[in-house]
């Protein structure tokens, strides 16, 4: 509704709200702040000490008393005013006139402020008593103020009722929600003091209390909201849904699922934000590429392929932000970590000091591709720069990448945020600068607007006053941050912002659980099924042995970066299989641990397997083996897990191996000997049920690997410092010249599918390079008819590749994914899939960093089908790093 009628409605709402300011200048739930002393009624207090339960501190003007929000016992709980009441526990405070401490009689915490935040507008909060100056307030009986001992010009103030409904704020443009976000951000920034701008260029920002601007809060949501739980209603837990991790979601090759997952996550994010449980700007998704299989954070990303990852972010981030409603963002999505980041800590070098040496060819052809999609397709409003340096320049100080390329070439109009602490490491780890003034300049002028951390807050003011950073650059950074803040509708009436109505009923819903369940079902990859051992026939199994350190896994199914989740505790693989077969038919033995070589439990597991008809062994990795800050040194199964599998296999009972892990596992012995192998990744809160469904044939698996599974000696042939794609045997299916255990895109099914070309598809076509540039209605299009020729319903991921067997150019990738679709078919059913070849895949990048669509013959592979097309005409340049450098 972008019409004059909508504009009229907005104006009417704005005038109505500004014409009726609150009659009470200090209403209930007003936050208490540290504020410049003015002796006004908001700062006039009475200290009542008549003995418990009558000890309290109240405002002289209306008798409202200090109150701990929600009876919270948490460090940092907000202090507000409420009442007057009969002073329940959370309103009882004892004042020590000697020390200045104000102690809660409810929890013995002290009223105070966070360390190093003693500026006007700081929140008054509850902290464990330390006797420090941050918890000392001296009562001045002359003007009835409680003055902060660390700075007697600052007083305890019940002034957070400042908002856009009261004068004079209701006349300021930033409060006028009929105006666009750019205008409002410009006006707000013009009213901020320099120190206020800098205070709000950090993730732990205070907002601007003197102007009624709340804190801009940040969190994470890689595969669900990283937060605690809200209120539990309608049979829910109140906790955020935990989907399979990004690798698992990617293995579905399902665009629609990614969009729905993003929408579900952002709905829960808003609902939890509205309960003050989490933030509203989220550092997700992680779109780095899983180039090296040892990388500890590979579990967070959609895999090794740039096209797959670009498609993933285009759908997941769009689902998060939901910009189809032009006026308001649902949340802010942040693509991370820009750029060329896939090392945590290897051979004594951490990500904090690693300098990735990357050619322009590899940057443009591979590392930049997902981030370009973030901007041009997903329209994310935030990008996070990484810890590492690239070619000698720390990422958060790289003006070429952030300002010239992301903003100038791709059109990024949001804000850059540093990874947490990444501004300080410019100086302290990379030694790119040697003082805080130059470090601030490198960060701000390099394009990083917001610091996750405190380096800007601690040092930027001095850098501006010293002339190292122009104040105009601070203004621009503040504008970018606050433009997104206003796009979220944080200061607008609830009736205008549809997402403000979301509450506890929108978290952990039956629909969200079902979507997480279906996602887990769709991502499971069948790697081997010798003799059609799977699916298991429940009618023929008297006893099933469920063995292994992951057999009864719960929280380990969630991967990393997950919120509080209690639902998964009742959905382990063991519990799910017991539920389907009956607990009397399922026998469990742990067998071993994941992360040590203790073999003392293996004999018991062997005994269970020997007494059963079939053994299912659940093995893999968890966060002690791979995580942020920790890379693997081997691709082998850790601990005694391989020995456990071998001992169970030696019983001669049919043995199924189920892998629960992030990074790929080089299981050569298992691949050769075990008759059935299932890859389940980290499947999320409903993962145990999904695995049981696949094992017992309730569904047919249809996931495909989003990465290459290398042999174990891969780690001996390549350094993790090697960022090249083609050298030393190559990496990823696009460049790897060795023989993998399983290749990217591999996946079996319980049913069979047949592919045939559609009638309009020709085996050889000719087009011009200009035609190949077309994003929409591309003439280079292939139609495939897919038929389920088996006896079981199933789904299939149809993957389409360009191949380099025809040598269109000598150093192109061996093959590269250009399209895919997930189809669901009943036995005998057919469907048609149309897969156009996009220009960004056809385009080749040469060693000079020039990306162009060039004349030549190209191969196409879809399943076992093959075709060719020829391009004629002059080169069509789509990106030229040489020209970009000249602009910079």
Image (tube, helix red, strand yellow):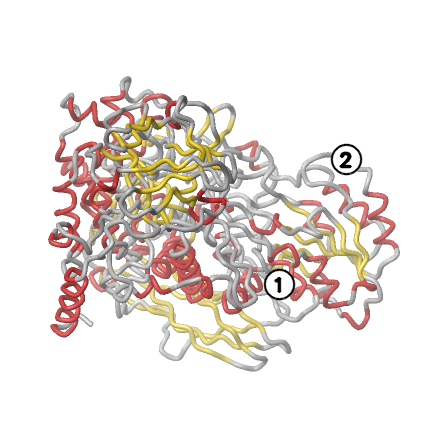
Residue 788, percent from left and from top: 56, 76
Q: Is residue 125 above or below residue 795?
A: above
Q: Residue drawn 26% across and 25% down? A: 152
Is 504 situated left or right of 314 in this image? right
Q: Which residue is mark 1?
A: 690
Q: Is residue 540 left or right of residue 374?
A: right
Label 2 vs 1, first from the N-terminus = 2
Q: x, y (%) of residue 40?
A: 20, 39
Residue 570 falls in which quadrant of the image? Answer: bottom right
- Residue 598 shows which numbered tag? 2
Vertical placement of 321 versus 599: above or below?
A: below
The secondary element bearing badge 2 is classed as loop
Taking the image as shown, residue 242 lies to the left or right of residue 328, namely: right
Q: Which of the image's four quarters has the C terminus?
A: top left
Please, which residue is most extreme toward the bottom here? 828
Q: Could you tell me how far apart the alpha carbons at marks 2 and 1 are, in whole angstroms?
A: 30 Å
- Categorize mark 2 by other alpha carbons within 10 Å: few (<14), some (14-19), many (20+): some
Which residue occupies 56% across, 64% down?
517
Label 1 element class: helix
Residue 403 is at least partly visible in this image: yes
Rate crowding at label 1 as few (under 14), some (14 to 19) or many (20 or more) other CA atoms within 10 Å.
many
Residue 296 showing in the rendered view: no
412 on left or right of 630: left
Q: Residue furthest front?
A: 50
Q: Nearer the viewer, residue 597 or 715?
A: 597
Q: Nearer the viewer, residue 24 or 239?
A: 24
């Amino acid at each position: 509704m972008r019409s004059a009628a909508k504009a009229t409605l907005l104006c009417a709402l704005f005038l109505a709200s500004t014409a009726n300011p609150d009659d009470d200048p200090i209403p209930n739930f007003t936050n208490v702040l540290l504020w410049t002393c003015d002796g006004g009624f908001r700062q006039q207090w009475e200290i009542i000490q008549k003995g418990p339960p009558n000890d309290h501190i109240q405002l002289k003007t209306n008798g409202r008393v200090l109150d701990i929000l929600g009876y919270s016992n948490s460090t940092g709980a907000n202090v507000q005013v409420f009442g007057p009441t009969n002073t329940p526990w959370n309103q009882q405070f004892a004042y020590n006139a000697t020390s200045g401490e104000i102690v809660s009689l409810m929890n013995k915490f002290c009223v105070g402020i966070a360390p190093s935040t003693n500026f006007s507008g700081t929140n008054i909060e509850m902290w464990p008593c330390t006797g420090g100056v941050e918890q000392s307030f001296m009562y001045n009986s002359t003007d009835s103020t409680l003055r902060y001992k660390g700075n007697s010009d600052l007083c305890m103030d019940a002034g957070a009722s400042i908002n856009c409904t009261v004068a004079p704020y209701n006349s300021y443009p930033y409060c006028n929600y009929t105006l666009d976000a750019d205008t409002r951000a410009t006006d707000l920034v013009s009213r901020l003091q320099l120190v206020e701008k800098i205070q709000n260029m950090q993730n732990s920002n205070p907002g601007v209390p003197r102007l009624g601007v709340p804190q801009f809060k940040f969190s994470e949501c890689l595969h669900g909201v990283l937060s605690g739980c809200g209120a539990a209603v309608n049979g829910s837990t109140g906790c955020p849904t935990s989907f399979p991790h990004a690798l698992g979601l990617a293995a579905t090759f399902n665009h629609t699922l990614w969009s729905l997952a993003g929408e579900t996550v952002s709905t829960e994010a808003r609902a939890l934000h509205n309960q003050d449980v989490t933030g509203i700007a989220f550092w997700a998704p992680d779109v780095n590429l899983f180039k090296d299989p040892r990388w500890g954070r590979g579990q967070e990303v959609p895999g090794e392929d740039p096209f797959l990852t670009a498609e993933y972010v285009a759908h997941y981030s769009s689902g998060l932000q939901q910009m189809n409603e032009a006026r308001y963002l649902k949340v802010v999505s942040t693509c991370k970590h820009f750029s060329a980041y896939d090392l945590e800590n290897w051979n004594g070098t951490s990500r904090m000091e690693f300098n990735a040496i990357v050619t322009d060819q590899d940057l443009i052809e591979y590392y930049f591709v997902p981030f370009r999609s973030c901007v041009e397709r997903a329209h994310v409003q935030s990008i996070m720069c990484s810890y590492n340096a690239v070619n000698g320049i720390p990422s958060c100080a790289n003006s070429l990448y952030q300002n010239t390329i992301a903003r100038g070439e791709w059109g990024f109009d949001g804000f850059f945020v540093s990874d947490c602490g990444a501004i300080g490491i410019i100086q302290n780890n990379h030694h790119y600068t040697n003082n805080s003034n130059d470090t601030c300049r490198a960060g701000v002028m390099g394009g990083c607007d917001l610091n996750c951390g405190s380096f800007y807050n601690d040092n930027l003011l001095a850098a501006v006053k010293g002339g190292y950073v122009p104040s105009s650059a601070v203004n621009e950074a503040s504008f970018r941050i606050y433009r997104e803040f206003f796009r979220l509708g944080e200061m607008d009436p609830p009736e205008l912002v549809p997402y403000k109505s979301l509450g506890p009923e929108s978290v952990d819903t039956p629909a969200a659980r079902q979507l997480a369940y279906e996602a887990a079902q769709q991502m499971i990859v069948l790697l081997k099924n010798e003799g059609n051992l799977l699916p298991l026939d429940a009618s023929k199994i008297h006893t099933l042995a469920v063995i292994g350190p992951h057999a009864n896994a719960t929280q380990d199914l969630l991967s990393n970066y997950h919120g509080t989740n209690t639902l998964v505790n009742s959905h382990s693989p063991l519990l799910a299989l017991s539920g389907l077969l009956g607990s009397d038919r399922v026998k469990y033995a742990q067998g071993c641990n994941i992360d040590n070589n203790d073999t003392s439990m293996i004999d018991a597991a062997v005994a269970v397997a020997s007494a059963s008809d079939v053994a299912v062994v659940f093995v893999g990795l968890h966060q002690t083996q791979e995580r942020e800050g920790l890379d693997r040194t081997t691709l082998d199964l850790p601990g005694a897990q391989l020995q456990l599998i071998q001992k169970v296999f030696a019983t001669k009972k049919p043995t199924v191996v189920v892998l629960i892990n992030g990074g790929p596992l080089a299981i050569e012995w298992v691949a050769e000997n075990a008759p059935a192998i299932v890859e389940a990744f980290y499947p999320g809160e409903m993962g145990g049920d999904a695995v049981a469904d696949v094992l017992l044939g309730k569904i047919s698996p249809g996931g495909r690997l989003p990465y290459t599974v290398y042999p174990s000696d891969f780690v001996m042939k390549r350094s993790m410092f090697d960022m090249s794609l083609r050298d030393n045997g190559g990496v990823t299916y696009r460049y790897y010249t060795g023989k993998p255990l399983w290749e990217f895109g591999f996946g079996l099914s319980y049913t069979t599918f047949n592919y045939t070309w559609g009638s309009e598809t020709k085996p050889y076509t000719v087009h011009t390079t200009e035609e190949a540039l077309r994003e929409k209605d591309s003439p280079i299009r292939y139609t495939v008819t897919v038929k389920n020729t088996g006896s079981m319903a199933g789904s299939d991921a149809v993957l389409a590749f360009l191949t380099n067997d025809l040598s269109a150019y000598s150093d192109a990738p061996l093959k590269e994914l250009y399209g895919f679709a997930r189809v669901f078919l009943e036995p005998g059913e057919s469907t048609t899939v149309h897969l156009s070849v996009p220009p960004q895949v056809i385009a080749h990048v040469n060693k000079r960093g020039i990306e162009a669509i060039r004349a030549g013959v190209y191969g196409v592979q879809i399943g076992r089908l093959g075709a060719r097309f020829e391009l004629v005409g002059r080169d069509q340049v789509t990106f030229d790093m040489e020209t970009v450098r000249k602009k910079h």
